[in-house]
Every structure is written in structure tokens, then in C-alpha cells.
Image (spheres, rainbow, N blue to C red):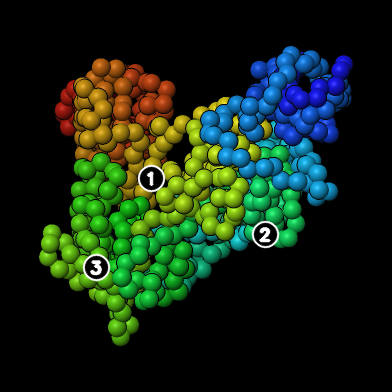
């Protein structure tokens, strides 16, 4: 076959691919050929590959390399390369950033690794493992404690302390009168010690040991910085991986309130490691993390005030749920101050003072400690992202398209660093999806429309889909029902009837649009409704399904029935 002088893009037909790994093998084989700048197979089922090559490349070399990998390729077309992107999902403009050079000064095609994942938290681990499963040479880069937020300073430590406080409450006065007397019985340093044990154990089993089980993943320790289109520098060494996934997570963020930075404050990380119990605490921020920690400290014996800027706590949950949760927390002795706009923070004689306004009137809050739980911001500073053509949003989040691809076609992003849906299961879903798209051209679209959310207060808030007001804005025929937990036999038997189950449905399709549960262990109750929403199960089908008696799961069926009848008048089971 003749040499091609001016052509930079070649389209190949590839036969013999039967799975995602095949696509990776073919891509790798093509990238190995000298002169290939990039190669992409848009999914094994496509039966094709696209190559961008420097002028003068001999197409026979491409075909031979594919054949060596065990597949058959034919050149179907050639032409000038349109832009740097070869990956099907990309829909951003070319930013004109040049690919990095290999260590030998020449571009090395696929680079040292097929995939480099930056960040060793949940998104990073999921991405690296998926890469290994697809047969790629993977590097996982981490700086800081392996495992990232969830295991070290997020889900695991917070939930074990919350559970400890729930057990204390259950052992104490069920009518909440005993909250203050419980304080004397809590050995706080022991609670923190047990938390540390669990964190260390889970970090070892779920991250360090897991990494050892994947010898195909190379672990690189150090801070990663991007250098050009697909170059990365770690601890003074340069790499040019085929694709990059940024999974660097997020960190606690505090608003620039006058005086706050000067006085010092707790964030969620330090609040989970406090060695001594404060007598009193102000929590700024009444969303999930703030509320969970506020209740922990209140149950441990601190006098806790929650100040929230928005008109209600749990501001993104259904209004009925927010209102009922406020009531339960107040019954436990927490002071809830919604609509509070902070003006300044000061500290004198070991006490914090937060001055603000509520309904136009000045309010001053005072306490021994202050916890700022006003959200988290993506970790994107000092990573060379701008220079690499990876664009950031107003909150520093990496901007991605629906395939999790950034404005740089070699770079994808996953998890909290994208600034949305900051849950660990979303991070891990992201990591896998980004890699399937980056390596196998799977063109999978990020879809979290039915994502369940749980706030681990007691009672818990578990929800998915639309709130009543969101549904009324978008749908014409919305039906709503709210079932008090007091009519659920399991709650009666457990003698804890706090909460409600609220369903929002579309009358036209007879399907659920949203579910909002406030109940002890509501997180264990939500999943049946999530499945119903995801797979279009109708209210009639839910009605016809058996739910076991004397379980909280039965509350869903009772709630469905409550659209039509007075559930309090049923004799026994949800029938
Ligand atoms: C108090 C709290 C409670 C939570 N509870 C829950 C819960 O109950 N359920 C739930 O689903 N979610 C919960 N979350 C959220 C959940 O923890 C996060 O959504 C999830 O851990 C994010 O994972 P990630 O992989 O995106 O980021 P991370 O886990 O933060 O991992 C990113 C890693 O990258 C490293 N890194 C950063 N920059 C670089 C660099 N340049 N080079 C190398 N390494 C770098 C970081 O040090 C970090 O280790 C909670 C969060 C908090 C704070």
C-alpha cells in the first residue's frame, strides 16, 4: 500500500472484536504504531476504529499491529483530521492545547499507561478497577490518605458516631426527656476511639487490600499536575498516559463571612475528630452534613443551635419533611434558626459569637464551639487544569459533558470534583462510566435521575425524584399522598411512630415521580420506590405486589393504598 503524505485521519473497519476489552486491545495496538497520535474505537460493537496519525504513516503498519493483537482491520477511508478529539462522546470545542511529549522527547502514542486516574478516593478506585477489567495498563495516583473522603472523613466516621448516639438514645429516655441526662453516660473519647478503629479497618480492607488484588494497577504516590493535553507530572516525573480521569474530590468550604477566618472554626473533618465535647455549639448550615453532626453533638450533651440561611433546614427536601424534621429536632432540645443571615463572627474569652439578622431583626448566637457546614468545593487548584484546556465552573468544578468528558478530549472527570451529586455511590458510578467512555468508547450517558438521597439524622430523611412543588411545576396532573408513620404496624410495634411517607405521582401515567420518607431507618425503606421509578412500575403494580407484614418496607404499599382509601381503617396487612 502507498504511503499517505498529507492524511492525518484514517477510518478502519475492525473484525473480531467481541467485548469491551477487545476495543481496548485494538486501541492499544494502533497507538503502538510509530506516528500515531491517537486512536479510538467507539465501542466493540461498532466494528471500527479511527486513527489520527502524523503525515507519512504507512497504513500497513496499522493493519499489521491490529493483526498482531488478534483482529483483522481494513482501511475504509482517509482524510484530514478534523480536530484533536477522536472519542465519540466529545462535544466540546478544540482548545488548541498540544499533546505532551514522551520522555524521549517524541510523542509516544499511548504513553506510559493507557489510563491514569488522579485521586485515590471512591471515584478513583472505581475508575482504576474498571480500567484494569478492560485490560488497560492503569496508574492510580494519590496524595493524602488513601481512600479519600468517604472512608476517612465522610460516610464511615460520621455514620458510626451517629449510630453510637442512636444507641445511647435508645437505651435512654424514649420520650426525649433524657437527652441532657445522657450526657453524663457518654465516654466521648471512647466513641472517637471506636470510630478511628473502624476507619482504619475499612481503609485497609476496602482500599489498601483491594489495591493489592489488582496487580495490573500501578499505584503512584504524589501530587499530580497536568502538563499539556495528556501530560502529567508526579513527584518530578513526567507521564503521557492515553487517557486521564480526574477524581480529586472536594473539601469543606466556608463562606467569606467577616471575622470567620480570623477566629478559626470546626469543619466536618475536624468535628469528627474532636477530642473533647463542647458544652455548646453553633452549627452554620442546616443541610445533610450540618444536621447529622448537630444531632450527634446534641445527643452527646452539647447545647446545639443550627443556623441556616435559607427559610428552612433540609432546604432541598420536600417542605413537609423539613417541617416535621424541624419539630423532631426541636423536641430533642436543638435550637433551629432558619432564615439567619450571618453578619460577623467574633471570639472572646473562649466563646464564639455569631451576629446576624432574621426577619430584619438582629440575632446574636453564642457558644463554646462553631462548626461551619456550608458545603464542599471541588479540589482543582494547583493542578495545571487551565493550561491543559480543562475548563472549570464558577465553584471550581471540572466541567464535563454527559459522557463525563472535559473540554480536553484526553481528560475525563468523576466524583465530587465535578461538583454535582456528592454521594459516594455516584462517585463510584461516575468512575466506571468515565472509564468505559474513555477506553471503550461506550458513549454511556451520566444519568442520575432517580438517585436516592439519605440524610442520617434520626429520624432519617430518604428521598428520590421530585418534591411536590417541583412536580407541580413540571406536570399537569400531580397526585400527592402523605402517610403518617403512626399507621404503619412496624412503627407501632417498635413504639416509634415519628415521621411520614409522602408520594408524588403523575396521574396521567399512574407512576411515581417522587418519594419522601422521614422515619427511623428511612434509608432502608426507599429502594423499592427507587426501583419502581427507574423501571416505570405503576402504582397499580405496586398495589398488586406483596409486602411482608410488620416491616417498615410495608409503609410504601400503605402509602400507595392511601391514594384511594383510609389506611387507618385496614384490619391488618396492606391489602
Ligand atoms: C461528613 C461527610 C459525610 C458523608 N456521608 C456520606 C454518606 O453517608 N453517603 C454518601 O453517599 N456520601 C457521603 N458523603 C460524600 C462522600 O464521602 C463523597 O461524595 C465521596 O467520598 C467522594 O468521592 P471522590 O472519589 O469523588 O473524592 P474523594 O474521596 O475526596 O477522593 C479524592 C482523593 O484525591 C486526592 N487528591 C486531590 N488532589 C490530588 C492530586 N492533585 N493528586 C493526587 N491526589 C489528589 C485527595 O487527597 C483524595 O484522597 C459524605 C461526605 C462528608 C464530608
Q: In which image quadrant can residue 98 be found?
A: top right
> Dots 2 and 1: beta carbons under 8 Å?
no
As drawn, the residue found furthest toward the front would be: 6
- Disc 2 versus disc 3: distance between alpha carbons? 40 Å
Side of 225 relative to 280 (left or right): right
As drawn, the residue found furthest toward the bottom would be: 349
Residue at disc 3, secondary structure: strand
Cβ of mark 2 under 8 Å from ligand 1: the answer is yes
Q: Nearer the viewer, residue 277 or 475?
A: 475
Across and down, in percent, residue 316 comes to 29, 45
Q: Which residue is mark 1?
A: 454
The relative height of residue 442 versus residue 385 in the rendered view (above or below) is above
Which quadrant, please, contains the N terminus? top right
- Disc 1 versus disc 3: distance between alpha carbons? 31 Å
Which residue corresponds to the image point at 31% horizontal and 79% vertical from the top-left?
347
Which residue corresponds to the image point at 74% horizontal and 34% vertical from the top-left?
37
Q: Which residue is mark 2?
A: 222
Cβ of mark 3 under 8 Å from ligand 1: the answer is no
Q: Which residue is mark 3?
A: 343
Across and down, in percent, residue 189 comes to 46, 73
Side of 183 relative to 112 (left or right): left
Which residue corresponds to the image point at 25% horizontal and 57% vertical from the top-left?
309
Residue at disc 2, secondary structure: loop
Q: Nearer the viewer, residue 435 or 275?
A: 435
User: Quick one: label 2 or label 1, which is nearer the N terminus?
Assistant: 2
Amino acid at each position: 500500500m502507498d504511503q499517505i503524505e498529507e492524511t492525518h485521519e484514517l477510518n478502519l473497519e475492525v473484525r473480531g472484536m467481541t467485548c469491551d476489552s477487545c476495543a481496548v486491545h485494538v486501541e492499544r495496538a494502533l497507538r503502538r504504531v510509530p506516528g500515531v497520535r491517537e486512536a479510538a474505537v467507539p465501542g466493540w460493537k461498532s466494528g471500527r476504529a479511527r486513527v489520527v496519525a502524523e503525515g507519512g504513516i504507512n497504513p500497513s503498519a496499522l493493519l499489521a499491529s491490529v493483526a498482531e493483537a488478534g483482529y483483522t482491520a481494513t482501511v475504509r477511508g482517509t482524510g484530514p483530521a478534523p480536530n484533536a478529539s477522536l472519542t465519540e462522546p466529545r462535544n466540546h470545542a478544540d482548545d488548541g492545547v498540544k499533546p505532551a511529549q514522551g520522555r524521549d522527547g517524541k510523542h509516544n502514542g499511548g504513553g506510559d499507561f493507557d489510563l491514569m486516574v488522579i485521586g485515590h478516593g471512591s471515584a478513583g478506585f472505581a475508575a482504576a478497577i474498571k480500567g484494569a477489567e478492560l485490560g488497560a495498563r492503569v496508574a492510580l495516583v494519590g496524595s493524602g490518605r488513601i481512600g479519600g473522603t468517604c472512608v476517612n472523613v465522610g460516610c464511615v466516621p460520621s455514620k458510626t458516631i451517629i449510630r453510637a448516639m442512636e444507641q445511647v438514645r435508645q437505651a435512654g429516655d424514649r420520650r426525649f426527656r433524657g437527652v441532657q441526662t445522657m450526657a453524663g453516660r457518654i465516654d466521648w473519647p471512647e466513641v472517637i476511639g471506636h470510630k478511628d478503629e473502624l476507619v482504619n479497618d475499612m481503609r485497609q480492607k476496602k482500599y489498601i487490600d483491594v489495591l493489592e488484588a489488582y496487580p495490573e494497577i500501578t499505584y503512584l504516590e504524589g501530587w499530580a499536575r497536568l502538563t499539556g493535553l495528556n501530560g502529567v507530572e508526579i513527584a518530578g516525573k513526567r507521564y503521557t498516559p492515553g487517557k486521564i480521569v480526574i477524581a480529586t474530590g472536594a473539601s469543606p468550604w466556608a463562606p467569606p463571612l467577616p471575622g470567620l477566618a480570623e477566629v478559626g472554626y470546626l469543619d466536618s473533618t475536624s468535628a469528627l475528630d474532636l477530642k473533647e465535647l463542647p458544652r455548646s455549639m453553633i452549627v452554620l448550615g442546616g443541610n445533610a452534613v450540618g444536621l447529622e453532626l448537630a444531632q450527634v453533638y446534641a445527643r452527646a450533651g452539647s447545647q446545639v443551635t443550627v443556623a441556616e440561611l435559607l427559610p428552612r433546614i433540609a432546604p432541598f427536601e420536600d417542605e413537609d419533611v423539613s417541617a416535621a424534621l424541624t419539630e423532631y429536632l426541636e423536641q430533642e432540645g436543638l435550637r433551629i434558626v432558619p432564615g439567619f443571615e450571618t453578619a460577623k463572627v467574633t471570639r472572646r474569652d473562649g466563646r464564639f459569637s455569631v451576629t446576624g439578622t432574621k426577619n430584619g431583626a438582629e440575632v446574636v448566637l453564642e457558644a463554646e464551639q462553631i462548626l461551619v457546614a456550608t458545603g464542599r468545593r471541588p479540589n482543582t487548584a494547583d493542578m495545571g487544569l487551565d493550561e491543559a484546556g480543562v475548563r472549570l465552573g464558577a465553584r471550581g468544578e471540572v466541567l464535563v459533558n454527559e459522557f463525563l468528558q472535559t473540554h480536553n478530549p484526553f481528560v475525563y472527570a468523576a466524583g465530587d470534583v465535578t461538583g454535582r451529586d456528592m454521594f459516594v455511590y455516584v462517585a463510584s458510578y461516575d468512575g466506571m462510566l468515565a472509564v468505559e467512555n474513555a477506553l471503550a468508547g461506550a458513549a454511556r450517558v451520566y444519568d442520575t435521575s432517580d438517585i436516592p438521597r439519605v440524610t442520617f439524622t434520626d429520624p432519617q430523611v430518604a428521598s428520590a425524584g421530585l418534591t411536590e412543588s417541583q412536580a407541580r411545576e413540571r406536570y399537569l396532573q400531580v397526585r400527592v399522598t402523605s402517610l403518617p408513620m403512626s399507621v404503619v404496624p412496624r412503627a407501632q410495634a417498635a413504639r416509634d411512630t415519628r415521621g411520614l411517607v409522602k408520594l408524588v405521582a403523575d396521574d396521567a401515567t399512574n407512576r411515581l415521580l417522587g418519594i419522601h420518607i422521614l422515619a427511623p431507618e428511612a434509608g432502608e425503606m426507599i429502594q423499592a420506590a427507587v426501583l419502581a421509578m427507574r423501571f416505570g412500575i405503576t402504582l397499580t403494580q405496586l398495589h398488586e405486589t406483596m409486602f411482608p407484614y410488620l416491616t417498615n418496607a410495608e409503609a410504601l404499599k400503605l402509602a400507595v393504598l392511601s391514594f384511594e382509601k383510609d389506611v387507618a381503617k385496614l384490619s391488618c396487612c396492606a391489602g
